Amino acid sequence: MKRILGIDFGEKRIGLALSDPEGQFAVPLETVRRTSDAQAIRQIIDTALEREVECLVVGEPLNLDGSRGPASARASSFARKLAAESGLPVEMTDETLTSVEAEERLREAGIDPRRHPERVDATAAQILLEQYLNESSSRPDD
């Protein structure tokens, strides 16, 4: 297996989560404050190199009916730039409602998500990466 970096793209903050080398679990890593795509991509690439990541997974915010909207197009555009700059494989995965689930997990842990929005982003990245790992492990050719 390979170490994978999960990325919860946002216009202000980008949450990052990291898988273990076996692809069994994901942990929240950090939140990148985004001032521009170029700056955020540079920070993500630096993190990927430092953590010996072999694949990037960007969350795609689909509408509740599964259709793609402006937020999905924006995340896809960012993912394409990230792939071009990093030279790493970049995959997209559905991130619908991960932020809602992240806020719920934080509240259950006694953390106020409104006071710690950066924790919401990193936890949302963890959730989308967990979903990706679960889907990957159930694919026959993996």
Image: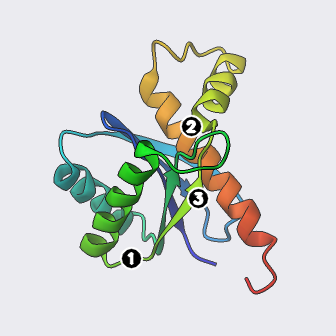
- In the displayed structure, does residue 88 sit left or right of residue 107? left
Q: Which mark is residue 88?
A: 1
- In the displayed structure, does residue 104 sit left or right of residue 76? right
- In the displayed structure, does residue 8 sit left or right of residue 94? left
First in residue order: circle 1 vs circle 3: 1
Foreground residue among 17 and 99: 99
Q: Residue at x 32, y 56 (%)?
A: 44
Whole-number angstrom distance, CA of label 1 to CA of label 3: 16 Å
For disc 2, the neighbor class at 10 Å (few under 14, some 14 to 19, many from 20) is many
Q: Secondary structure at mark 2?
A: helix
Q: Amino acid at mark 1?
A: Leu
Foreground residue among 58 and 111: 58
Q: Which mark is residue 93?
A: 3
For disc 3, the neighbor class at 10 Å (few under 14, some 14 to 19, many from 20) is some
- Residue under label 2, please give it: 123
First in residue order: circle 2 vs circle 3: 3
First in residue order: circle 2 vs circle 1: 1
Q: Secondary structure at mark 3?
A: strand
How many numbered discs, if any?
A: 3
Q: Point out the image quarter for the N terminus.
A: bottom right
Of tags 2 and 3, which is closer to the observer?
A: 3
Label pair 2/3, CB-CB below 8 angstroms: no
Q: Residue 102's x, y, as percent?
A: 62, 31
- In the displayed structure, does residue 90 sit left or right of residue 142? left
Q: Secondary structure at mark 1?
A: loop
